[in-house]
Structures are given as structure tokens and as C-alpha cells.
Image: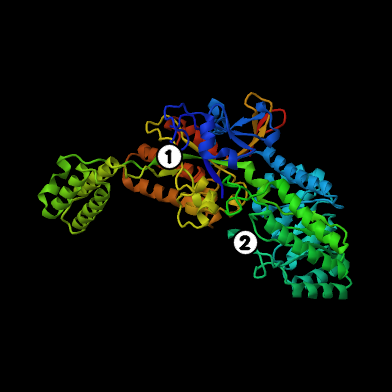
Amino acid sequence: MPALACVDTTAFPPPPSVVSDTSCRWNSSLSAALYRIDGWGAPYFTANTSGNISIRPHGSNTLPHQDIDLLKVVKKVTDPKPFGGLGLQLPVIVRFPDVLKNRLECLQSAFDFAVQSQGYDSHYQGVYPVKCNQDRFVVEDIVKFGSGFRFGLEAGSKPEILLAMSCLVKGNREAFLVCNGFKDLEYISLALLGRKLALNTVIVLEQEEELDLVIDLSRKMNVRPVVGLRAKLRTKHSGHFGSTSGEKGKFGLTTSQIVRVVRKLRESGMLDCLQLLHFHIGSQIPSTALLSDGVGEAAQLYCELVRLGAGMKVIDVGGGLGIDYDGSKSGESDLSVCYTLEEYAEAVVASVRSVCDRRSVKHPVICSESGRAIVSHHSVLIFEAVSAAKPMAQAHHDDIQFLLECDEARVDYEDLYAAVMRGDQESCLLYVDKLKQRCVDGFKDGVLSIEQLASVDGLCEWVLKAIGASDPVQTYNINLSVFTSIPDLWGIDQLDGKIDKFIGGESSLPLHELDGGGGGSYFLGMFLGGAYEEALGGVHNLFGGPSVVRVSQSDGPHSFAVTRAMPGQSSADVLRAVQHEPEIMFQSLKHRAEKLMHTKGGGEDEDDEELNNVVACLDRSFNNMPYLATEPASMSNSLSAAISNLGFYYSDEDGFDYLSA
């Protein structure tokens, strides 16, 4: 559910809803108000004095000289190499690891303060659910940035366990590796192997029958497991993201199943292995009242497990820490939450402490799986608007002469003309509809030509504009696959690839008019899309993934350094993903070209030159990105060369650039 906003807002005309004096000069403050940047973007995004979106990499601790102008980043990334750029093609994901680091630190700080201020006798130790964004550098950054406070990872599948284990061997040895999800023999074997490798692995049971595998394999592998339970709480999140919560949720164990698991562990001499209780009441928890209710119920269950003799140490409150996508700070919307990080942490700690104190139970370690809140802000998707639906041409007098010659149409036309002359807006709308429908019927019957039908459409559009009833909204066509790069936006209550939901419940977004003269690219940015979007995206229309760059704050002239850049997937890459063989496809087409050239009967040199051109064109198309190339023709050769290079760019801390295959 990312937020959409303009990158460059310097020349936008002031709308009446924002400023009453339309002669007022547009400025960055008005841009920020129009797009509500200070609501959904704080403290990481703002409109700077140049009118561009600025990244504040360290959040509220960012110093003025550390702001990163996003438009300068885009220019650095997209300008051809001979002009000092990287020559990458849009769309591009721009990652800001400094923002990721700040999000981790803010989450940890919020819990540390709640623990200290409430006299809580244990600590907070979070994990990042890698399903939110499995990108290698995102996960490695989280392990590195969180090492000082034992921040770990959560995995829900066998590939995710392998990923998590390989990253955590470089992290803090006390960091949790929480193993969730449905499990088979190999999954549990990997989790137990993690304990043999001295990783702090916890196997969280989602189904009762998984326990038999854990007991059997742990004995065969001679490893003492640490086991957790995922409980189905009665507390239910009623919003869009609460479908997996409550007693009817598909994940976790009922109270009856939990009792049976405890009994079986006791009989196996492994009740001390049961150390963690996990639950999840849904993503985007809207309020701390719902949160406190769920955590309080879970804390009661935790205390009961202690009473039954389990070796309980950790309560894992799952995910659900929400993002204020629209800046409304409302608990009534799936796109917002009415609490801060600090208030979330305070509610969790207070609920656990209250129940445990009442039951005289030692305070457990508090764990959370806050993925969305950690990674959403750290990346921005940049793409271009390439064209807009052109307004309908208006009809001239000669074009509509036929209306006066057709008895039926003439009546509707005269009624419409009279309504326009007397300023009767309601009647105008009625007669516009009648005239258009009559002419459409005539076209279907073969009475009207396509030129005549177009003239009627133009006439009706002119009338609607004259009475102020025309739709001012234009459709902008963007160089982006909505289905691939922002699946949440179309996957929730939408059926096609049209973006028509924006901040504040608006169905359109104020934008500049596109420069039809080709005077430059028009960039748009999709924000708060760092969680789930990349993981959920597919290969709709075989567009594939965009280019990706990594940008860190630096003390250089532009306050940033591009430390890594990867071109987006080529057409060949995407074809392989759906089981095609680009090399074989290329050879088949090349063979067809050779066969046709030999049968043309032209000169040998001429045929060879044409064949070489065909083969070169095919080769470029297989190796270029599937997205539209909107740069001027003079730049196309250098861009093609850059995209064809399948290596990656990176820069070390001293500023030396490298290109590696």
C-alpha cells in the first residue's frame, strides 16, 4: 500500500483547495500540503526549497546538510555514463540503508524506554520477518545494524531458513531465528541443524502433528530443541488485515491442542524445551486498545504454560505494528494507525507486565516480528509518466452539418442548443446523453460514419466544458507494471492495472501537464513500498523487476553516494523465469532469418548486412529491459550497452568505483 507523490513540484499551479489566492507563487510548503507529505512522509520525506522530494536519512536526527535530493539521485542513476551517470533505465528502486538503520534503532529505542520507564524486569529482542522483503542486502543490513541489540530474523519456509541462517552466522549469537510456517521433515531438520551451528533457533509449532517430527528428529540428530507455540487467540482484528486472526484463523493451535502438546512434551521429558509463546492478531493493528487486549490474552496463556511446568522465557507478539500510509493517524482506516512507535511499545510492555505481576510470573523476554514498520520507508520506486490521454477534439460547424439534415438527430441537437443558450445545465446533461446515444445507435446501424460519430463526441465535450461539467481528470500512462511493482495497490479491492486511490481518499492525483515537446522526463515516486511489494510482485506481461540502486548519506557535494546499482531484469531473464529458453529462442529466430535471406536472391553482401542487422536487433531485444525506453534516440546506444552489462556497480567507502561481472 505505497503512497504516490510527485518528485518535482516546482511549477505546479496552486489549486483553490490549498491556497485561495491563485496569483500566489507556488512553493515547497504548498506542495507538501497538497500531497500531505508531512503526514505520511515524516520524518523521512519532505519537500525541499528546490521543490523536490528530499530524503532525511536519519529521520528526525538528520542535519540540514545531510538531506538527499531525490531528483539528483534519479539524474545520477539515469544519466548516460559519458555524462557522469550510471546509465540505468527506469523504473528503479532506490534503497536508503540509513533509513533502514534508523527504523531499527527507533523500534529498539521505543521498547527500551518502555521497559525502563515501567520497571520491566526483562528486555526486548525483536526479529525481522524476511518474507516482507527477502532482498539480500536488506536482510544483511538488518542483521548488521541490529547486531548490537541482538536483533534476529523470522523465517517461514525452507529457503528463508537457509537465507536466515547464512546471514545470522555473521550476527549476534543471541539473536533469535524464529522458525514459523507449516513444516515438513526437511524444514525441521534445517531448524535443528541451526542449533548445531550455535544459532539461537526456535521451532514454533503451527500444527499439532509437527511436534512428533520435532521429537523424533531431535533424538536422531542428538540436539536439544527450543520449541515455541503459535496460539490462536480469541482476540480478533476486524479490519482488512485481520482475516488470519481470531479463533477461526488458519494458523496456530487452539487451547485444546496446546494442552495436548504440553502433555506430550511432558511425557517425552522435553517440557523444558517449550520456551516461547507466539501469536499474531493481524497486520496493521489499528489501535493500542486492540493490541492491549490481544497481548493481555496471550500473557494469560503464557502464565498458564508456566504454571503447567514449561520452561517459558519469551513472549512473541508477532507482527502488526502498523504504518500510517495516508498520514491521517486514524484507527478507522486500513491505511492508517492511531499510535506512534513509542505508544505501541508502551502498550505491549504494560500489558505483559500487568498480567505477569498479577500472576507472580517472571517477566519474559518480549519479541516482535515487525517487518512492515521496519522496511516500508527505506525504498522509493521511481518511474516515468510517458503519455496522457489527449482531450477530445472539438467539432466545427461543417462537421456537424449532418445533424441538421437528419430529422431525429436534429430534434436532439436543437434541444441541446436551446438548453445551452438559456444556461440550463441539467437539461444540457440530459440532451448530451440523448444525442450521443442516438448517434451511437445510428453508427451501429451503419447510418453514421466514424468521422460523424467523432464530431458528435467533440460537440458534446465542448458543451460539457462550457457548462463546467467536463471531467478535469486525465489518465496518465506510466512506464511501470502496477501488477509487478505495486501489487498491494491493485490487489486490494481493485480489479485492473489502474491506480485511482490516493492520499485522503482522492480518486485522482494533481500532476503537471506532460511536456509534449519532449523537453524532459516526468518522474513520479512511489513511497512506503519497501515491505511485501517486491516479494508479492510477479511477472505480469513479462515486465520483470526494475533496476535497483543503493544510496547512502555521505559528506560529498550532493550528500549521497550510490554504493550499488543493478540493472533490471532483461527480457531473457524474465523469459527464463517462466520456463522459456532465450538462447534456443534466439537461435531459432536467427535460423529463420538466415533461411529467408538465402531465398531472397539479392546480392551476397547486401544479404549479409541485413542478416547482421536482424541478428543484432534480436540480441539487443533479448538483453534489454522489457520496460519502455523513453530516453532520446541519441542516448539509446549507450543505454543499451549499460543494460546489456549484467554486472553490478558498487563503490567502497573511499569512493572508488568498480564494475564486476
Q: Secondary structure at mark 1?
A: strand
Query: Which residue is at 62% across, 31% downward?
Result: 68
Q: Amino acid at mark 1?
A: Val
Relative to 6, is 370 above or below?
below
Q: Which mark is residue 600?
A: none
Residue at the spot of label 1: 386
Alpha-carbon span between mark 2 and mark 1: 38 Å
> Is 229 left, or right, of 8 in this rendering?
right
Q: Quadrant of the C terminus?
A: top right
Type of amino acid under label 2:
Gly
Q: Is residue 114 left or right of residue 551?
A: right
The residue under the point 75% across, 45% down is 110
The correct choice, above or below, for 162 with respect to 643 in the image is below
**Above or below 632: residue 323:** below
List the residue tagged with mark 2.
Answer: 242
Residue 267 coordinates in the image, percent (x, y):
87, 76
Q: Badge 2: how crowded within 10 Å, few (<14), some, or many (20+)?
A: some
- Looking at this view, is 211 or 509 the one in front? 509
Percent position of residue 430, x then y: 25, 53
Q: Mark 2 or mark 1, which is nearer to you?
A: 2
Please give the name of the residue rendered at 68% of the width and 46% of the height, measured from the top-left corner.
340
Position in image of residue 71 (x %, y %): 55, 32
- Which sits in the foreground, 615 or 369? 369
Residue neighbourhood size for the residue with mark 1, other residues' Cα within 10 Å, grouped as few (<14), some (14–19), many (≥20): some
